[in-house]
Image: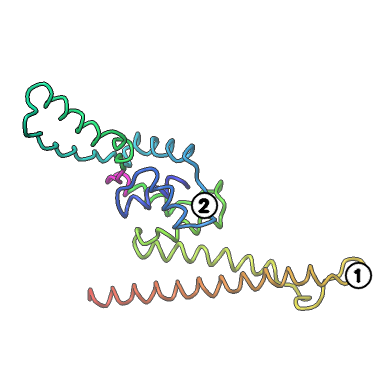
Amino acid sequence: MLELAILGLLKEQPLHGYELKKRLGETLGFLWGVSYGSLYPALRRLEASGAIEIVEPAPPASPPVPTGSITGDVAAARLRSVADRLTSGTRRTRKAYRITERGDALLVELLLADDERADPEKAFALKLAFCRHVPPPARLALLERRRGVLVERLARSASPTRGRPAKTASTPDRYLASLMEHRTRSVERDLEWIDELIAAERDAMREADSSVA
């Protein structure tokens, strides 16, 4: 899923490694923690596949030639010294990456694919963050798949004893019952939220169709 996150961020603008790491945290918060040890190998893989490319930094502007009484070799040495100070320490920080046409296609492919190895909650959050980059029908399909997951989860949590204290042996366990009730309500709230997103997506698709017609 790291490749998806990288491509989604680079779709917006070119970024270097530090910026990518920072934006990952800002976009997904605690759901996504990535180290440089995993980020840079992922960048190299994407670059090797042609999905991203390095943005070459613009050459630094030439410093003005010193004037006055300093001429000849002394002036040339001072000029080289100024140029070295301007460029030292900036080559690495200015190296940025941008997405390519191949990366655009891969981004859509990853957004629509199901990765059984990934955490389903993190995967959905990541896809939702960048789903604006896929066509509306694909966005709707993504939301409807999530709705199906939530409906199934809600059905598993429902029981005839819901709202009454659960019992283990002969001892009432109000804490376990409260925890189960909390989980059920959380799923219900998520389901309401997804239904709102689906309704908004369908409305937007109808408006787009009517404007074309």
Rendered location of residue 139, percent (x, y): 40, 63
Which residue is disc 1 drawn over? 171
Which residue sits at x=54%, y=56%?
30
Rendered location of residue 38, percent (x, y): 48, 39
* Residue 158 appears left or right of 103: right
Is residue 2 on the magenta stretch?
Answer: no
* Residue 188 appears left or right of 99: right
Which residue is disc 2 drawn over? 32
Label annotation for residue 2: none
Secondary element at tag 1? strand
Which residue sits at x=40%, y=58%?
130
Rendered location of residue 103, percent (x, y): 32, 45
Secondary element at tag 2? loop
Residue 75 or 35: which is nearer the viewer?
Answer: 75
Residue 173 or 58: which is nearer the viewer?
Answer: 58
Residue type at mark 2: give it: Trp
Question: Alpha carbon of mark 1 to alpha carbon of mark 2: how far?
Answer: 41 Å
Which residue sits at x=37%, y=64%?
137
Which residues fall within the magenta stretch? 97-104
Mark toward the start of the polypeptide (1 vs 2): 2
* Residue 192 appears left or right of 11: right
Rendered view: 139 above or below 105: below
Question: In the rendered view, how is the structure colored?
Answer: rainbow
Q: Give the crowd class for mark 1: few <14, some 14-19, many >=20 residues within 10 Å.
A: few
Q: Which mark is nearer the camera, 1 or 2? A: 2
Residue type at mark 1: give it: Thr
Numbered circles on residues, count: 2
Occupied quadrant, residue 50: top left
Residue closest to the far top: 73
